[in-house]
Image (tube, rainbow, N blue to C red):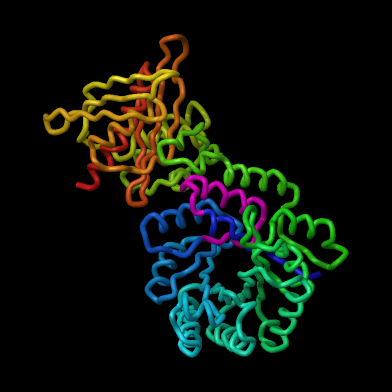
Amino acid sequence: MQTVTCSDVTLKTALSLSFKEKIEIAKLLDRLGISAIELPVFSGEKRDALLIKSIAAGVKGSVLCVSCPLEEAGIEAAWAALQDAGKARLQLVVPTSTVQMEYLCHKKPPVVLDMIGKLVKKAKSLCPDVEFVAQDASRSEPEFLETAIRTAIDAGATLVTVSDDAGIMTAEEFGAFIGALQKGVPALREIRFGMQCNDGFSMANACAVAAIGAGVSEIKTTVSGAEAADLDTISQYFRTRGMDLGIQSSMQFTVLQRAVKQIRWILHTERSKTSAFENIGSGETAAFELSEHDSITQVVEAVKALGYDLSDEDNTSVYREFRRISVKKTVTAKDLEVIVASTAMQVPPAYVLQSYVINSGNVIRATAHITLQKDGESLSGLCTGDGPIDAAFLAVESIVGHHYELDDFQIQAVTEGKEAMGSALVRLRADGKLYSGNGISTDIIGASIRAYLNALNKIVYEEG
């Protein structure tokens, strides 16, 4: 029985998603039993490092694969962010066609070969699982491509992937292409051999099937897009023809349809395409429950899964409040969000709310006039927005003179009746780090402004 694995590139190409959405998709792919989850080229920024670490905390079974910059320092930085993952893979994507070597790498073939050897060796010294991807392999000179593959294998690559980025090969041609490479580089039969085909001409799925028949053991898939074979289609192929063709996979077919449907909803819903202040949803949060029997280690891991990187002192404060609440009830992800917002990083307020006036209606554009006090001085801001809360947040921004990414916004009632108290939770992101604020008021707009200021004051305090 031939084992074929799927390495999913959905998150590698879905760049417009929010931090939270990327983590949720990674968890769904992990639950589905995907062999590897691929992330984009590591930029070296704190935001990328935090995303990798947050996804690593939530992914249990899948390999987390990070594409590295084509330089040794970039490989070291990518590994520093990835090294705590349960299963880690460093990936090096190198152009091998003449056109792409000239225009993407600005290097001649001999220099590219030398680079492949050095970079793969560097990655291997840090991580035991290293993938070499021959970009635009289908348009490469056969002799050079084989030499590049041998160079990568000799340097320690454990997985070699060839890519038809142009998507121009037919299934028959791709199968023959794989067979010729295995004949020219016998070492490919001794390691994992992968493929990727662009679906621009709707041939990726057929090429993947042909490649499997020719001996490939790993294929690139995606839930949505033209960058690779379709995960749903390929998984159904495994499910219906796998036994007949002697193919087995680690995917959990029983949860396939639901997981793919959820991922597609996240990818295509309008909230993934709107601006930061329009991205105000229902407050969906990672699903988990904690009880009084859970240790501080488990609580800290849950906090990290929510995207927070707290100090030891703040983690202790969160756990202390968690213990108080968990005696009375099961603590959900939403409960833990509120605990973090109300107990972690409590700081002296730099900005204090003095007053706010909101004008809104179905025939006028919402307007907010906010007055804050800082160091004894009154500062005012006037802005319009798509709604009263959007206008209020923008007015605060105009006073502060800085835009922070709104990662999440939640509102809920904490008491009952006409005079119910409303609780608002705001999560802002600055330099890749999350800061949460909580506000309570009988006026939900007032609660939202106070929550925003609570998070903002934490940012200002840490920035000095």
* Residue depicted at x 78% and y 64%: 248
Viewer can see residue 410: yes
Viewer can see residue 297: no
464 above or below 418? below
372 above or below 269? above
Residue span colored magenta:
15-39
Q: Name the residue at the top extreme.
A: 418
185 above or below 29? below
230 above or below 159? above
* Residue depicted at x 58% and y 62%: 63
Q: Name the residue at the left extreme.
A: 376
Q: Judge by depth and name the residue closer to the eye, 4 or 99.
A: 99
Q: Along the horizontal axis of the image, is 400 left or right of 404?
A: left
Magenta-drawn stretch contains 20: yes
Q: Judge by depth and name the residue closer to the eye, 423 or 160.
A: 160
Magenta-drawn stretch contains 283: no
Q: Quadrant of residue 170?
A: bottom right
